[in-house]
Structure formats: structure tokens, C-alpha cells
Amino acid sequence: MLFKDYTYSVLVVSSSSKFTTSLLPLLPINEFGPIDTAKNFGEARRKLLERNFDIVLINTPLTDDFGIRLAIDTAADSKSGVLMFVKNDVYDEVTDKVIDYGIYTLAKPVSVSLLHQILKNMYAVQERFRRIEKKNATLEEKMEEIRLVNHAKWVLIENMNVSEEEAHRAIEKQAMDTRQTKREVAEAIIKLYGN
């Protein structure tokens, strides 16, 4: 497995128990897990509301919906990668309806090697999303620290009658002297002056 420190959660949605039974052995536990199943649109929606899945596999048609609406809703409302299995005679029509949503489609019957390739591509995309989210979280934390430090500087300017440059130096010096982050010093200043 390319990304050994993480397994990808999967929801298999299929009205056919035979399809689900044949698919599960193709999802090795060292790469995929936990794996959950749903037999129809309604059950899948409930499970998708309960938790997030990295990958959603939909074997069409479902008993209560073809599966296009479930695929589009899932792709629009979550970060899940979605793969639809469709009959060969409707492959082009279904693909045209879902491709703009970033949904993968495969015509049935599907070869094992092709399915493995698509799943590897799907979790490569999921890994990219994970890295982007981590980077965004780091940037958001840094922006919050800058906001707090700026707020603390203005508190010092108002309460100690110092310049912005002097306030900035005071925060940096306090952080170095006390072995705290600038954020921690800024939070203490804001708390001390009740602003």
C-alpha cells in the first residue's frame, strides 16, 4: 500500500448481496477499513449522515433509487470519493450525468485489475485531500495567532501607552523569556487587561 499509515473507510451500497459478497474480498483490510454496507438509498443516506466515509461504492440500480442521486448528493455533501458500477448499456449516459461531480463510473462486469487501479486512484485523491486539509488547518492556526498577537499589541498600546513596534518587541521578548509561544503571551495579555 502506498500510504501505509492510514486505511480508507468504505461504504458499499448494493441491493445485490451477491455483488457485495464478491466485492468485499477485493478490499484488503490493510488498505480499506472499516467497511460498512447498505442495501438501498435510504439506508445509505442514514449511514452517510452518521459518519464520513473516504470511499463510497454504489452498485446500480438500487431498489429505491437508481443511485445517481445518492452519488451526486454524496459527492456534493462530503469529501468521499464515489464510484458507481453501472450496466454497460447505460455507462455513457450515467457517466455524462455524474462526471462533472467528480464521480467515477465503471461498466459492469468489471475486471479485478481495473477495479484495483480505480481504487488506488481514489485513495490517492483522498490522500491529497487529507494533506490539503492539514495544510489549511496549519494556515488557519497561524492566522489566528497573528490576529491574537495584533489584538494584544493594541491592548498594550492602549494600556501602556507604547508604540506598535514597542508592543511587538515586548510580546516577542516575553515569549522568549518565558519560553512560551507568541500566541500564549498574547492570550495572557488580553486576559490580563480584560479585552
Image (tube, rainbow, N blue to C red):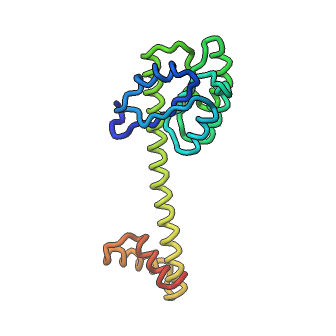
Tell which residue pokes out farthest to the bottom in this image. 160
Image location (x, y in percent) of residue 193? 50, 85
In the picture, measured across the screen, residue 29 lies left or right of residue 69, that is left
The answer to whether residue 75 shows anywhere in this view is no
In the picture, measured across the screen, residue 188 lies left or right of residue 38, that is left
In the picture, measured across the screen, residue 84 lies left or right of residue 176, that is right
The residue depicted at 51 percent of the width and 33 percent of the height is 11
- Residue 101 lies in quadrant: top right
- Which quarter of the rendering shows the C terminus? bottom right
The residue depicted at 32 percent of the width and 74 percent of the height is 176
Compared to 101, does 186 lie above or below? below
Compared to 154, does 26 lie above or below? above
Image location (x, y in percent) of residue 182? 41, 71
The residue depicted at 36 percent of the width and 78 percent of the height is 174
The residue depicted at 44 percent of the width and 78 percent of the height is 188
- Residue 16 lies in quadrant: top right
- Pick the residue in front: 38 or 79: 38
